[in-house]
Image: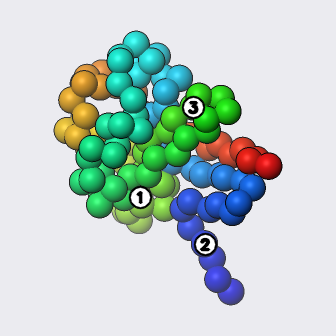
């Protein structure tokens, strides 16, 4: 049996479960940055397992790391802290007080 982890997409739908930030996060919304622009400028984020998702119908942007990237011996708290540190290092404009969280979303594009 084949099990697919992480980002799943076809021509009509998108779904994901990540630890990260989104454009509705009050800490991100108050900053004049585009998560998409920042992600595209930071290839090291992609090389370290980060993904960017965008829903243009609702103006939502998500940037984070799939839960499947969490190490077996790592707690969720430790994983969230490591994601936060990587985001702050890559995008200092976010500030040290940024909150990361688990985000599960999906939408139909048809």
Residue linked to disc 2: 4
- Is residue 77 visible from the viewing direction of this image? no
Closer to the chain start, of discs 2 and 3, is 2
SS at circle 2? loop
Asked whether 76 or 35 is in front, the reply is 35
Q: Are marks 1 and 2 in contact (CB under 8 Å)?
A: no
Using the image, determine if residue 10 lies above or below residue 43: below
Can residue 46 be seen here? The reply is: yes
- Local crowd size for mark 3, using a 10 Å CA cut-off: few (<14), some (14–19), many (≥20): few
Query: Residue placed at 32% from the left, 37% from the top?
Result: 38
Residue at the extreme bottom of the image, as rendered? 1
Q: Are marks 1 and 3 in contact (CB under 8 Å)?
A: no
Q: Which residue is mark 1?
A: 70
Q: Is label 3 in a helix, a strand or a loop?
A: strand
Crowding around mark 2 (Cα neighbors within 10 Å: few <14, some 14 to 19, many 20+) is few
Marks 2 and 3, how far apart at CA: 25 Å
Is residue 6 shown left or right of residue 15? left
């Amino acid at each position: 049996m084949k099990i697919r982890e992480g980002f799943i997409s076809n021509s009509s739908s998108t779904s994901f479960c990540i630890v990260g930030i989104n454009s509705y996060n009050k800490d991100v919304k108050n900053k004049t940055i585009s998560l998409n622009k920042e992600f595209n400028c930071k290839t090291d984020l992609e090389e370290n397992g980060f993904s960017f998702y965008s829903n243009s119908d609702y103006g939502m942007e998500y940037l984070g790391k799939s839960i499947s990237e969490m190490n077996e011996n790592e707690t969720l708290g430790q994983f969230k802290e490591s994601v936060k540190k990587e985001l702050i290092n890559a995008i200092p404009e976010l500030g040290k007080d940024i909150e990361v969280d688990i985000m599960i979303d999906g939408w139909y594009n048809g």
